[in-house]
Image: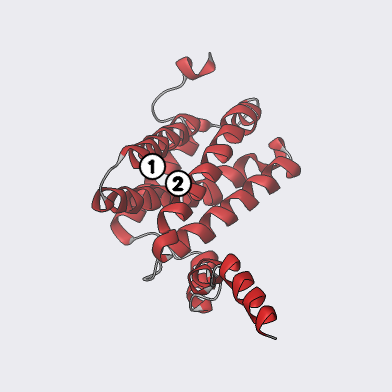
Amino acid sequence: MLDILMSDKHAIVLLKKDHECVLKLFEDFKKAESKVEKESIITQALEELKMHAVVEEEIFYPTVRKQVGAEMMNEADEEHHVAKVLIAELEQKNGGGDHRFAKFTLLAENIKHHIKEEENMLMPKAQETKVDFEALGAMILARKDAMMKNGIPVDAEHKLVAGSRGVIDSPAAAAKKKKPAIRKMAVREGDETRA
């Protein structure tokens, strides 16, 4: 109901528009048939998510943290951290190989959960505060404009993943190298009969 009264420059309206954008990209990804189309959607979604994370972490979260409460904000912070690790892994040159689309699907599921919590719990609680959401919205728009011109800053998660040289994504890499367990069992059984 309050959403109807908010202008297009209200911080929460802007953040919800970002949510709608990435949710649509996730749906488009599910419907995409070609690898090229899926890759294009991934690239666009990652850029949208990175910019959104920056404005939330630099502007929105610090403004509402005290009023919303540490528990809810700490969970939001950790959800951002997990998402940014997945984003960093997806942006590596190797990109997760044949696990890439699975990793993006996992990212989408995590983001959907995060959006649901933000829109159903965090944002309504934030709206009860005396924050000037129009001024906050202007700050968000200015920060996004700056990122469009100057690029999105590299976050700690990207540095961590880059520094790992693929070690962090090792479960996906290791899965390719493992021999099927059923074959190992058959070989062992065959060895026993020869003895």
Crowdedness near tag 1: few (<14), some (14–19) or many (≥20) residues, C-alpha within 10 Å: some
Residue 59: % across, % down: 53, 47
Taking the view exactly as shown, the residue that stands out farthest to the bottom is: 195
Of residue 34 and residue 86, the one placed in the foreground of this image is 34
Side of 27 where 181 appears, left or right: right
- Kindly identify which residue carries mark 2: 52
Side of 155 where 20 appears, left or right: left
- Kindly identify which residue carries mark 1: 141
- For residue 7, above or below residue 113: above
Quarter-wise, where is residue 82 in the image?
Answer: bottom right
Q: How far apart are marks 1 and 2 (CA)?
A: 11 Å
- Image disc number at residue 7: none
- For residue 176, above or below residue 136: below
Dot 1 falls on a residue whose secondary structure is helix
Residue 100: % across, % down: 42, 58
Amino acid at dot 1: Leu
Identify the mark nearer the N-term, 1 or 2: 2
Amino acid at dot 2: His
Instruction: Mark 1 and mark 2 in contact? Answer it, CB < 8 Å.
Output: no
Residue name at image x 53 percent, y 51 percent: 58
Quarter-wise, where is residue 110 in the image?
Answer: top right
Of residue 80 and residue 37, the one placed in the foreground of this image is 37
